Structure formats: C-alpha cells, structure tokens
Image (tube, rainbow, N blue to C red):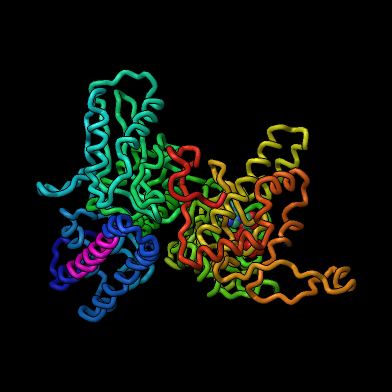
Amino acid sequence: MFPQRLDSPLAYDIAKAMVDGFNRHYRLFRTESARAKHRFETADWHGQQRAQRERIEFYDLRVRECFTRLEREFKAGALPMDVWQQIKLHYIGLLVDHYQPELAETFFNSVTTRILHRTHFHNDFIFVRPAVSTEYIENPERTARPTYHAYYPTRENMREVFKQLVNDFDLRRPFEDLDRDTGYVLQAMKRRLGDAKLRTNFQFQVLSGLFFRNKGAYVVGKIINGFTEIPFALPILHNRHGKLVIDAALFGEDDLLMLFSFARAYFMVDMEIPSAWVQFLRSLMPRKQRTEIYNALGLAKQGKTLFYRDFLQHLRYSTDRFRIAPGIKGMVMLVFDLPSFPFVFKLIKDYFPPQKETTREQIKAKYLLVKQHDRVGRMADTLEYREVAFPRERFEDDLIEEIRKFAPSQLEISDRDGDGHLEVIIKHLYIERRMIPLNIYLQEAFDAGPGDPHARAQIERVVIEYGNAIKDLVAANIFPGDMLWKNFGVTRNGKVVFYDYDEIEYITDCNFRRVPEPRNEEEEMSGEVWYTVGPHDVFPETFGPFLLGNPQVRAVFLEHHADLLDASFWQAHKERIAQGHVYDVFPYDQKKRFNPTDGETDLS
Ligand SMILES: Nc1ncnc2c1ncn2[C@@H]1O[C@H](COP(=O)(O)OP(=O)(O)OP(=O)(O)O)[C@@H](O)[C@H]1O
C-alpha cells in the first residue's frame, strides 16, 4: 500500500545515510579505476593486478560499513515496516538526479536485505525492479567528460583525425611510432570497409576513457558509415623498449566478445555514468547481456542483480525442470542445470571421497582466488549466491534426492514466505556459464569414427586449444591441479575453459619434479608409486597415461604440446614468475598483431 504521507522523521535521515554510503563506495571505486591509467603509464603491472584484485572487495566493505552505521545511529533492525517503506520512497527521491541510480538501488538492496526479514524482500521495501530510469543521464557541467566522443574524418584527413583520437587519451608515455601504427590501423580498417563509399554520416564514436587490464589499455568504439556500424577495439601495449604501440585492430562483435569474455578479469575504467557506457557497449555487442557487461566493467554486484532478475524472468517464461547436469559427476561439487537456461548451478557437497583432502572453506577459498585472479580467458567467472529459492515443482525428484544425499546441509524445502508454494532453498551456490564438458565433446567426435574428417578436425582443434588453455593458465601462475578432460569445457566460440577449481594451486607453490630413476628391478617393475611424494610435488611426465589414451589425441598433443609433459617446462616458468615476470596473455588471435615480434611473446 502506498503511504499517503512521508511522516517519519527518521526515514529521510536513513535514506540519506544510505545514499552517502553508496556515494562513498562509488567514489573509491572510481578513483581506484582511474588510477589504472597511471599504473599503465608507469608499467606497474604488479600494482595493476593487485588493484584488480582488491577492488572486488570494496563493495562488501562499504555495505558492511553502511549497515553498521544504520544499526548504531538508527537502530535500523527495530524499525517498523511502514518506516522502511518511506525510506525506499525517500531514497528514490534522492536518486532523481543521480549519475549511478541503478548501482545505488542495488546498494540499497544489499544493505536492507541484511536487516529485513526475507518475507519483506518485495518491491514495497527493496528494488526488486528498478525505479529510477537510467535513460539519457548526462552531466550538464561544461567541464564534464562525455561518455563518448565523435570524430568526423574525411578521406583526406583520416590519418590526422585518427592520431588526434589517440592523442586525446593523453597517455603520458610516448608511442614508438604513432604514425606507423595509424597506417596499420587505417589499412586494417580499409580492408574491413572494402570499397564502401563514405557516407555523409561517416564517423568514429569512441568511448572517452581507456579500458585497462593487466598490461594492456584498449580504445573501444565504433565506425559508423550509412546504416553500417562496425565495433572496434585497439589494444595499446608497451613494446620491449618500453614505448607504446597499437598492437592490433579488432573489428566486429566476435572480436569484442573475446575481449569482454566472462573468463577474463574485470576492466578498470573511469566512468561517471556507467549505464551510458553499458548502453554504448551493448550497441557494439547486442548478443551480450547487460549483466555480463556490468561484470566486465568491474560492477559485479550490478551484474549479479541483473542476472537474478533475468533468471526469475526466465523461470516465469519457461516450463522445463532443473536436472543433474550431464557429464561425469563431480566428487566435491554437485552440479545441476535447467536445460533451457545457459548456466550451471554448483553447490559444495557435505562430504568428499578420501582422495579429496579438502573442506568447504578451502573450496570456497579456491573459488574466491579465481574470482580475484586474472582469469586469462581460461577460467569461468562464477556468481556466488546465498539462500536461493526455486519453485519445488520445477525440480526433478532425482535431483532433490541427489542434493539430500550429498549436500543435506545446503537444502531446505519449505514454504518460507507462506504463499502456499513449496520452495527449494539452497543455502550457498555458485552459478557459471554452461559449456560442453570437453570429455563429452571429444567423445562425440570419437563416436563419429576416425573416417569422419569433420570429427578429426574437431579433435585436432580442441586438443591444441586444451594445451593452449593450460599454457595461458601457467602464464597466469595457475596450476589447474586436475587436468583431466572432464574439468574443461568448450564455449560457444570454441574456446577451451577450465572450471574445476578445487585443486588449483599457484605455479610458484608447486614443486615440479621428474620421476626418479628406479634404484632396482623391484622398483622398476612396481605398478605402484615407489618414490616419496611431497604435498606440492607434481610429476608432469605422468600426465600422459590419463590424457592420451586415444591415438589421434596423442599424436596431436605430442606434436603441439609435448613440453607440458616435461618438468623443466613448468619449472622454468615457475622461476620466471617467481622473479617477478608478468607474462603477456593476448585476448585476441596472435595473427591479428601488427608486429608479432614486438614486446614479449606468450608461452605458446
Ligand atoms: N560450467 C559448466 N558447464 C557444463 N558442465 C559443467 C560445468 N561445470 C561443471 N560441469 C559438469 O559438472 C561436473 C562436475 O563439475 P566440477 O568438475 O566443477 O566438480 P568437481 O567436484 O570439482 O569435480 P572433480 O571430481 O573432478 O573434482 C563436470 O565434470 C561437468 O560434467
């Protein structure tokens, strides 16, 4: 019921305290993101990675701070519900001219859901749906930086305009040869545009801030010509002499999707009006959900909120049932999915078989490590949720039985909100993109038979990709622990991504060893491991028997990735990382680089 009067003197003060709490959060978040430019200019790669990691924590810290303030100053937990309703209305009022209203609404939800009882998690008290529009928000001040700039080159001045576009980012480090790089970019653009006539509206629209991640900075924009729009991104890197170079020109939605993939670390971008950035980015990648774009921009809580809204909407408009996910069941994770929805839901089992010496806390710590680490396009991002309620009638009975058997502590079946509908409530779960498990993918190709050329090509491509995935992980200082095919998935665009995190370790914590020579015949003939093995010892030459049973797989693997079976490969990279080296990992095809010998090479 809508209150006729806002008559609680406390309600405004509380709403104001919450907006202040959010503003403080966004100010800190933005400052940290803006500092990425300086870190890039000064080649502070460790600092960049540290900041990427630490920024993820900011949100929860600010929510906790705000919650504590409300409890201390206003005894928020004891307030009657009509006051809470007024708080929401005041809060909406305070957001009328706000530049990040959607994020502020999410912040409100994060704070209030810590205080209110679950039965009040509806639109009267929290923002189940958004209330304040994010359309057409602009900062009217003349000095404010707009979301994007438009440039209108002609054929004659294209080179000059393009150089201006790059110089407008005001990078405080010289380019080695911007004129040369401009030539590369314009050539690539010409190839892309073909002999299309330049229309009167021909222009470049470019987001006004650079996107920073690891050792790269990216210009992101689009070319508009008549009715055609071509998205583009230009990676800027340091070359081996510490000078800046434009390393490639990426055109089209597919290349941008790779750059903004869910399997990479979040970008650092200085944004005043994030919704306007999201809108622009969506125009470049219409197939990418808004939730994933917010995630890629480091606004992961907003991504989470939108994901949940999209998920509820999907549930309402679908009829299929949650089921045990296809593939080999996990020993520590219980995985289920909804066939019509492209994500999987993972919960940690209550007990594990003896070979898995781990605990719920350790597994959570590994998932957190992946969230905070550079995922280099090879580890899926996860969204973590607590107390998720699903309609009971949408669950298959054998899935319920499975959860009851392996994770009873995580399961509640009840009608908590008293609306007459039974719900399955899962205490803690991770949600991540569904992929085709690599073992299933390979099996399908094996089943097609060695005479099928398409299947053979598929096996070859995916085995090479698998080795590349492991090498990218190595570059990011990650040892996957368990490298079996079943722990990797194949994405929509054919990339191989790792998703089983419970055994990962830092490469620098592992001890890569050769299997010692047997000292006598008895040891030699022994089918058992006869040498002593420390807790962090890894014997790469023993990977083969588990992975390479199939002759075609074996041949392809040995041709491209035999080094992975050699302890010295791992040990050498471990040493370089330990010395402080940060490897380049390119979020685009190496073939697209203008000058592949520039800078360092990656591991492949
Ligand atoms: N993102 C995903 N997409 C598709 N299927 C998945 C995904 N994540 C997990 N699965 C399926 O669930 C199974 C178990 O998942 P996962 O490997 O994470 O569990 P685990 O308990 O850690 O496994 P292990 O027993 O190897 O330690 C996988 O083998 C796969 O079949």
Q: Quadrant of residue 254?
A: top left
Extreme left residue here?
142
Residue 329 visible in the picture: yes
Question: What residue is rendered at 54% in x and 68% in y?
Answer: 508
Residue 338 visible in the picture: no
Q: Quadrant of residue 285?
A: top left
Q: Nearer the viewer, residue 188 or 110?
A: 188
| Rendered-image quarter of ligand 1 | bottom right
Q: Nearer the viewer, residue 81 or 448?
A: 448
Residue 486: horizontal and vertical position, in percent?
A: 66, 55
Q: Nearer the viewer, residue 400 or 278?
A: 278
Predominant SS of the magenta segment: helix
Residue 26 part of the magenta-drawn span: yes
* Quadrant, the N terminus: bottom left
Residues in magenta?
A: 16-32
In the depicted structure, whether residue 418 falls above or below residue 490: below
Question: What residue is rendered at 52% in x and 56% in y?
Answer: 379
In the depicted structure, whether residue 545 falls above or below residue 350: above
Residue 163: horizontal and vertical position, in percent?
A: 25, 37
Question: What residue is rendered at 66% in x and 62% in y?
Answer: 567
Residue 269: horizontal and vertical position, in percent?
A: 30, 53
Q: Residue 449 vs residue 66: left or right? A: right
Residue 351 part of the magenta-drawn span: no
Q: Quadrant of residue 32?
A: bottom left
